Image (cartoon, grey):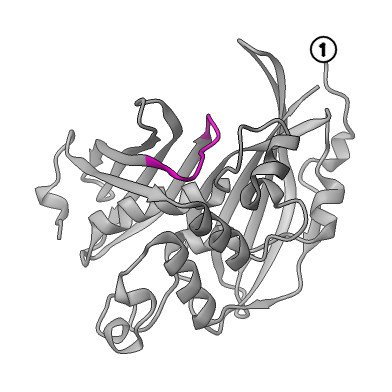
Amino acid sequence: MNSFEQINIGDTLGPLELFVSKDQCRAYAKTMGMGEGAGRFTDDEAARKEGLPGMILPGNMSLGLLSKLVTDWIGSSNAWLTRMSTTYRVPVQPDRTITIHGFVTNKNPEDRTTEIDVWMENEESERLVTGTATVEFRK
Amino acid sequence: MAVNYDPALINKVFEITEPVEVKAEKIKRYCAALGETNPIYTDAEAAKKGPYGGIVAPPSFAVTFRNGRHFFENVPRFGLRGFDAGKDVEFVAPIRPGDQVTLSSHVKEIYEKTGRTGTMVFVVIRSTLKNQNDQVLAHIDHRFMNRP
């Protein structure tokens, strides 16, 4: 558990190493009710027809995983993730190891917020998804 | 190249979706798909003692509400290939089971960028999520990228 006072610029979150299987990716797409047009998230062949290397993770799933890194860090603190911003740079492929990182870039005592850079990397340390998060610590 | 579009599109609210009820079961399946195990999202007893006094959805659940047909009919397209370039989400209030969620959406901005790989056109659609009490739950800016 983190308190606002204990946090310092430069603190790291994670890294969280994950192996997202194709079945997990399909389960996410199914849970979200993604229907037609979701082939790129469920089927290698359909994805290749769209010029992709194979199945990819939905962008929203990456956003969910980056948010989870931050909410895990918040833990049971009285804090709230107020903002998450993502940029999908490179398609994220399932059945590979991905690593999610975070880094505190700013701390504002006036409104008790922290700014955090978050990103997802593949095994080649290529940044697939980048983002920023804001966490507000309440008294 | 300059992008041609109807300027009346900007700020025009083109959709308010039918309410969708948030079910605890769907939150549970969402958590399972993401590997989320925090009991405040799934266990009523544990959640009661948590900061929200009951089960809430993980913040990112806000992006799972789907826009309807009108959304896609009104998103301007400037090329053959378009894809999701990113999102900016402001989480205003927790989403709880039983909430009846509606989305209202409008075109926020359209702009061009020229990068290493050529010209790209970005269309930003803002959706606002509200519950049955007219309480704002989240604002979501969807950034779509098109290659002319």
Q: Which residues are magenta?
A: A88-97
Residue B17, percent from left and from top: 76, 67
Position of A80 relative to B41 (above/below): above
Q: Residue at x 27, y 84 (%)?
A: B46
- Which quarter of the rendering shows the C terminus of chain A? bottom left
- Which quarter of the rendering shows the N terminus of chain A? bottom left
Q: Residue at x 52, y 52 (%)?
A: A22
Q: Is residue B93 visible?
A: no
Nearer-the-camera pick, B72 or A55: A55
Image-quadrant location for residue B26: bottom right
Q: Chain of mark 1?
A: B
Q: Which amino acid lies under the numbered mark 1 shown in the image of this protein?
A: Met
Q: Is residue A90 magenta?
A: yes
Please give the residue where the numbered disc 1 appears in the rendered image: B1
**Dot 1 alpha-carbon crowd within 10 angstroms: few under 14, some 14 to 19, many 20 or more:** few
Image-quadrant location for residue A27: bottom right
* Left or right of B97 in this view: B122: right
Q: In this view, which residue lies farthest toward the bottom?
A: B45
Nearer-the-camera pick, B65 or A123: A123
* Left or right of B141 in this view: B120: right
Residue A86, percent from left and from top: 49, 40
* Left or right of B144 in this view: A103: left
Residue A106, percent from left and from top: 26, 36
Image-quadrant location for residue B64: bottom right
Q: Residue at x 87, y 40 (%)?
A: B8
